[in-house]
Amino acid sequence: MNTLTIVAICMIGHLYSLVRRREIDPKWKGILFALTIIIIGIIFLDVTFNAETYTKWLAIGIIGYLIYLVSKNEEFKVSRTIIYSVIPLILIEFISGLVKLINDGFYKEYDSYFSNASSFAIIWIFAMLFMHNRQKKARKKEELQRQIEEEHKRALELKKMQLENQVEQRTAELTQQKEELEEALAELKTTQTQLIHHEKMASLGELTAGIAHEIQNPLNFVNNFSEVSMELLDEMEVELKNNNTEDVIAIAKDIRQNLGKITQHGKRADAIVKGMLQHSRTSSGNKVETAINAIADEYLRLSYHGLRAKDKSFNATMDTNYDEHLGMINVVSQDIGRVLLNLFNNSFYSVEEKKKSAPESYKPTVSVTTKKLEDGVEIKVRDNGLGIPKKVLDKIYQPFFTTKPTGEGTGLGLSMSYDIITKGHGGSLKLDTQEGEYAEFVIFIPF
C-alpha cells in the first residue's frame, strides 16, 4: 500500500468526521462512503495484484477530487488548511509518475531526488497538521472564552434587568416617601409658623405688665400737666376779668409749656404702643434705619418691668453702656427687637432663679453694651446668673431645646434669634458662659 493511498484514507476519514460533527448536508456522507469503497478496492488491487503503478494514479485522482470538493464547498472551509497541505505531495507524485511513464531510465537516475522531494512534502504535511492542531486549540480556546464571555454577558444582562427592576421599585418607593416627606415638611412649616407666632405672642404677653408700667408713666405726666393746666386756665379767667394782661401772658406761657410736656409724653406712649404692635406683626423682612441704642434700651426696660409686675420682690440692676457714635443701622427692626427681648427675658430669668439660692450679698445684674466696629455693630447682653452647662452648649440653638423647667419655655427663643441674626442679617450670635457665674451673648450685625 503506497503513501498516497494512506493519505487518501486519512483525508476521507477527516472529512467524514467533520460531516458527522457539524451540520453539513448529508449527501456528503454518501459521497465519502463511495470514495471509501473505491479506496478499499485500490488496496485490494495493490495487495492482490501488486498493481502499485495503477493504484497510485487512482489515489492521485481521489485526492485531487477531494481537494476540488473542499475548495468549492464552504461547508469544508475549516479543513482547507489540512487538505491543501497535501497539494505539494500530489504534485511531486504526479510529476514523478509521469516521468516514470515517459522515461523510466531518467526516473531511475533521479529517483533519489523524487524520493527526497516526497519526504519533504510529507514533512510539510505533518508541519501543517501541527499548525492546524495549534490553530484548532487556539480556536477552541477562543470559542470557550467567547462562550464564557457570552455567559458572563447574559448573566450581566440578567443582573441588569434585576437591578433595573429593583431600581424601578426603589424609585417608586422613594417617590412615595418623597411625597410623604413633602407633605410632612409642609405640615412642619405650618406648625413652625404657628409656634413662632405663639412664641411672639408669649413674649408679648410677658411684656404686658412692662408695657403697662411704661405707658403709665407718660399717662401720669399727661394727667398731672392737664390738671395743672386746668387750674392755670381758671387763674387766667380771673386775671382777664381784672384786666391783668401781664399775668395772663405769664399764665399762657405756663400753659404752653404744660401742653408741650403733654405732647411729649403722649408721643412717648404712642411710640410704646406702635413698638408693641410692630413686635406682634409678621416681619416684612425690609430693613430700615433703626436706632439700636433706643430699641435696646426700650426692650430692656419693658422686659424688666414685666418681671417686676409678676414678682414685686424681684429687683435687678440694669447696667447700660451705649456707644453714642453708633447712629442709625439698617436692620429689620421688629426682628432685632424680638432677639433682644428673648435675650433680656432669659437674662432676667437666670438672675432671678440664681437669687433664690444665692446669698444676700448677691446682686442680680443684667448689662447691655453696644459698640460700633469697622464693619458692623456689636451688642453684648451679659448677666451674672446661672450660666449654661458645657454639656448643652451645642444644643442651645436647636429648636425646642430649653434649660427651663417644663411649661416655662418653648425652646424657640434662641433658635429664632439665631436664625434672625445669622440668616436674616448675615451676622453672628456667640455665647461666652461659665456655669454658675455668668452668660454673655454677643451679637454682631454687619453694615
Image (tube, rainbow, N blue to C red):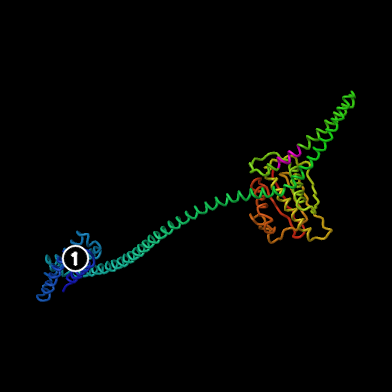
Q: Residue furthest bottom?
A: 48
Identified at 69% across, 51% down, the residue is 429
* Left or right of 367 in this view: 162: left
Identified at 85% across, 33% down, the residue is 231
| Mark 1: secondary structure | helix
Res 284 → quadrant: top right
Q: What residue is pinned by disc 1? A: 90
Identified at 45% across, 55% down, the residue is 172
All told, the count of numbered labels is 1
In the rendered image, residue 271 lying in the magenta stretch gets the answer: yes
Which contiguous range is marked in magenta?
A: 267-275
206 relative to 82, above or below: above
Q: Give the image location of residue 280, x and y in percent.
A: 67, 44
Q: Quadrant of the N terminus?
A: bottom left
**Visible residue check, residue 192:** yes
Q: Amino acid at mark 1?
A: Ile
